[in-house]
Image: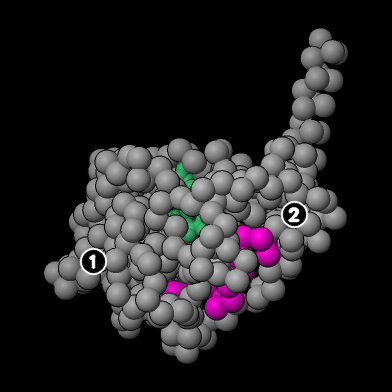
Amino acid sequence: MKILVTGGAGYIGSVTVEQLLKRNHEVIVYDNLSTGRLSAVAEGAKFIEGDVLDAEKLAEVFSTNRVEAVIHLAACALVGESMANPLKYYQNNVIGSLRLLEAMTNAGVKKIVFSSTCAVYGEPKEIPIKETHETNPTSSYGETKLAVEKALRWFEKSYGIRHVSLRYFNAAGASENYGELHEPETHLIPNVLRVALGEKEHVEVFGTNYPTPDGTCIRDYVHVIDIASAHIKALEILDEKSEVFNIGCGDGYSVKEVIETAEKVTGKKIKVIYGDRRTGDPAVLVASSEKIQKELGWKPQFQNLEQIIYSAWIWMKKMLEVESNQLQASQGSFHET
Ligand SMILES: NC(=O)c1ccc[n+]([C@@H]2O[C@H](COP(=O)([O-])OP(=O)(O)OC[C@H]3O[C@@H](n4cnc5c(N)ncnc54)[C@H](O)[C@@H]3O)[C@@H](O)[C@H]2O)c1
């Protein structure tokens, strides 16, 4: 299939593109590089630098490429930032998605897999969280993703565009070639690993008085390769129907457990500073992914936290080596001239 991947230069996008290419799909990455990197676009994919807010450019992309399906990952994705600047989130995530859907409608492209999030649920009433759980986001980020999920239903009714919304829980880990590198980094695992590498002095833990066994928040970490494979499975059902699926492992780990596991994996002591709770952080977020397991036969291959952290650790060390070799090479060429 010829697939347009918006946000394909980002963390989850880079691994999704890599997995699509492995399965012989033809891939076009459309990304404005606001948080993504050109070096994260897998060889074999066509790259177009562009913004999902740019209706003209999108129309041109669809008119010059026979796109059969879209995987839409491009978004702003930081809960804290979305509370400080909801306008940015509504513009990029909601208006950007509508521009994309408009371009798809005009071009007659009828399949989309949408990156949604567990943030659509808000404070959960039941754990594990099923797709039928009420949606009541506690952040403007979650609200923008829910708005797009709802818009997709109307675009199906009126324009026949089928969709699968994948509500990921916490993406983590790395493939051999691609992993998580954000600036600033707000996610726990890469930050803990940066401390282990000596790139950061300490990691901050937000809140120690949650109603959990050790007082820190509990999250469901799902490997990025498993997230990528869920997209590929999702593409397969778009001929028949639209759906919403959770993507998680069903196991919850506390922040303290993540730090302890990272210490074990890296063999390094992680310095921790304990801070206050952040607004909008639910105590426990753990997925029931029974629905996608039953309906699409998707099953996470990486279910063990140690394995997930290990893959991120190996990738991060490799990245650091590449950077230091590049630095040495540039210093070498400087001395030679
Ligand atoms: N990382 C997680 O744990 C997680 C959890 C749930 C949902 N998600 C969703 O998954 C998707 C990818 O997340 P990620 O962690 O890879 O983030 P990321 O920031 O690494 O990737 C987002 C990509 O989208 C691009 N982008 C942003 N706005 C754009 C625009 N207007 N036009 C074109 N490109 C644009 C960025 O340059 C970047 O390459 C997002 O939609 C996010 O909301 C992520």
Residue 89 left/right relative to 266 = left
User: Which residue is found at the position 84% from the left and 13% from the top?
Assistant: 335
Q: Which mark is residue 150?
A: 1
Please determine whether, in this image, residue 337 is positioned above or below residue 233. above
Identify the residue at image location x=58%, y=61%.
Answer: 216
Residue 249 lies in the magenta stretch: yes
User: Quick one: which residue is furthest to the top in this view?
Assistant: 337
Residue 89 lies left or right of residue 265; in this view the side is: left
Please state which of residues 332 and 289 is positioned toward the viewer in this rendering: 289
Which range is magenta? 245-258
* Residue depicted at x 31% and y 52%: 140
Name the residue nearer the viewer: 316 or 200.
200
Which quadrant holds the N terminus?
Answer: bottom left
Furthest residue toward front: 209
- Can residue 316 be spotted in the picture? no
**Label 2 close to label 1 by CB (< 8 Å):** no
- Numbered circles on residues, count: 2
Task: Identify the mark at residue 233; answer none if there is no mark.
Answer: none
Estimate the x, y position of residue 283 in percent, counting from the top left: 48, 65
Name the spot of residue 59 as percent of width and height, x first.
27, 47
Upstream in sequence: badge 2 or badge 1 = 1
Q: Is residue 41 above or below residue 221?
A: above
Q: Which mark is residue 313?
A: 2
Q: Identify the image quadrant of residue 135.
A: bottom left
Query: x, y (%) of residue 134?
Result: 30, 75
Identify the amino acid type marked 1.
Lys
Whole-percent x, y for residue 270 in the image: 75, 49
Relative side of 195 to 134, left or right: right
Q: Is residue 265 magenta?
A: no
The quadrant holding residue 263 is bottom right
